[in-house]
Image: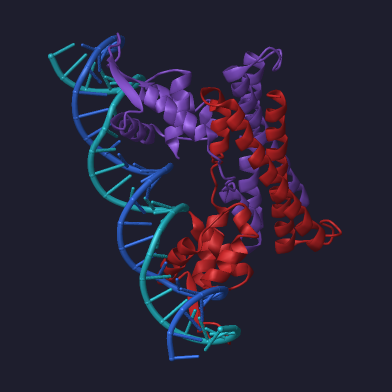
Chain colours: A red, B purple, C cyan, D blue
DNA sequence: CGAGGGCTTGCAACTAGTTGCATAGGCCTG
DNA sequence: CAGGCCTATGCAACTAGTTGCAAGCCCTCG
């Protein structure tokens, strides 16, 4: 894969331009698949030549025109096929984890500072996610189904990831206190 | 960064050849930084020309000679400097998460199968980590310090990651039951 | 001896993602 | 109208990692 299918998912949820997708990503699918606008444009271009998405120029008042992308039937087929494929469980890649393991080969106090900075950041993210949760799902997952339920559950995943980091880094700091 | 510093950490723990590092990675640092032997050779070569590591050919009985790498003082400095640098909290990248979110655009039953396969895999990994924990740290972290404590804590992180996945995927499956 | 198999190193070509910058439309302000 | 700023698209060069393959060394088995 790569970004391709993530963009197809985003476009099936809601057609949009490159920049809109970039923004949308940063607060939804981007929790699990970060992407810059350059990368998004590149992939949209490729998918367009492959016929997975269609483009239409849309004029805007007060802003330059944008190119709105939408998924074609062929693109929808590609997405459906990909969804059914097995995904191998790829191991998480974390620079911070390498630092945790290597801390004794440098200045431990400095590493602990790095850890604290990261911990603070994860607290910020967790707060952010909790706000989204409160705003969009005050009643919990009751009554949700289909796409909405999936969106809820992925947000739950985002929360769980942040909780994981907070618990782990806290354990690390306490063990080295 | 990239692999570079992870390899420096591994080599400071214990000098070794490319293939040994590849094997060691797959059951230690590789829990958070997977790497193939090709990539490892490439990086070792670069680090050698930059003077971060030194090489020595070591003959073996019954096997071809190997090139054992060790960290030079210059390499140790590079590592220490990197450890003290801030690391920005990079968001996790997960193909499976994209499938979870996009499941309603394909065959949901097929996606649930994919999820179940991944869940089973995470159970296997968790069991593996728990065995390591039992074998190497029967008494828990008591008496550990420095490198050994860090190694213990990173293994704890590996366990926490697997628990995260198991809990999340289970929640997903139950919500769609 | 020769074939096969595991260990060891590595190249080549490709794919994905990052970084830095360029261009252009359209607004608003001085 | 010139300058600055925001939106919007995109190119070019680079870096990192993946995939597929090859080649040499050394042993064992037939």
Residue B110 appearing in the image? no
Q: How many marks?
A: 0
Q: At 55% across and 32% down in the image, what residue appears?
A: A99
In the image, A62 versus B68, the foreground residue is: A62
Place of residue A22 in the rendered image (x, y in percent of width and height, measured from the top left): 56, 65
Q: At 62% across and 58% down in the image, what residue appears?
A: A29
Place of residue A98 in the rendered image (x, y in percent of width and height, measured from the top left): 54, 32
In the image, A11 versus A113, the foreground residue is: A113
Does residue A161 appear left or right of residue C1 in this picture? Answer: right
In the image, A114 versus B135, the foreground residue is: A114
Assign the N terminus of chain B to one quadrant of the image: top left
Q: At 71% across and 12% down in the image, what residue appears?
A: B139
Does residue B45 appear left or right of residue B99 in this picture? Answer: left
Q: Quadrant of residue A50?
A: bottom left
Vertical placement of A47 versus A128: above or below? below
Vertical placement of A93 versus B111: above or below? above
Place of residue B132 in the rendered image (x, y in percent of width and height, measured from the top left): 61, 20
Place of residue A37 in the rendered image (x, y in percent of width and height, measured from the top left): 50, 64
Q: At 54% across and 41% down in the image, what residue appears?
A: A90
Q: Quadrant of residue A155?
A: bottom right
Q: Quadrant of residue D23?
A: top left
Residue A4 appearing in the image? yes
């Amino acid at each position: 894969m790569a970004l391709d299918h993530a963009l197809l998912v985003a476009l099936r949820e809601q057609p949009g331009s490159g920049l809109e997708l970039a923004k949308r990503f940063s607060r939804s699918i981007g929790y699990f698949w970060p992407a810059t606008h350059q990368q998004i444009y590149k992939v949209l271009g490729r998918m367009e030549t492959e016929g997975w998405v269609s483009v239409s120029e849309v004029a805007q008042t007060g802003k330059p025109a944008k190119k709105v992308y939408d998924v074609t039937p062929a693109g929808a087929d590609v997405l459906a096929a990909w969804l059914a494929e097995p995904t191998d469980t790829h191991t998480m890649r974390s620079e911070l984890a390498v630092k945790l393991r290597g801390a004794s080969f440098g200045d431990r106090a400095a590493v602990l500072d790095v850890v604290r900075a990261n911990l603070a950041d994860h607290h910020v993210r967790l707060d952010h996610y909790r706000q989204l949760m409160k705003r969009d799902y005050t009643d919990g997952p009751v009554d949700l189904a289909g796409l909405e339920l999936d969106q809820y559950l992925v947000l739950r995943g985002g929360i769980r990831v942040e909780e994981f980091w907070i618990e782990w880094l806290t354990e690390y700091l306490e063990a080295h206190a």
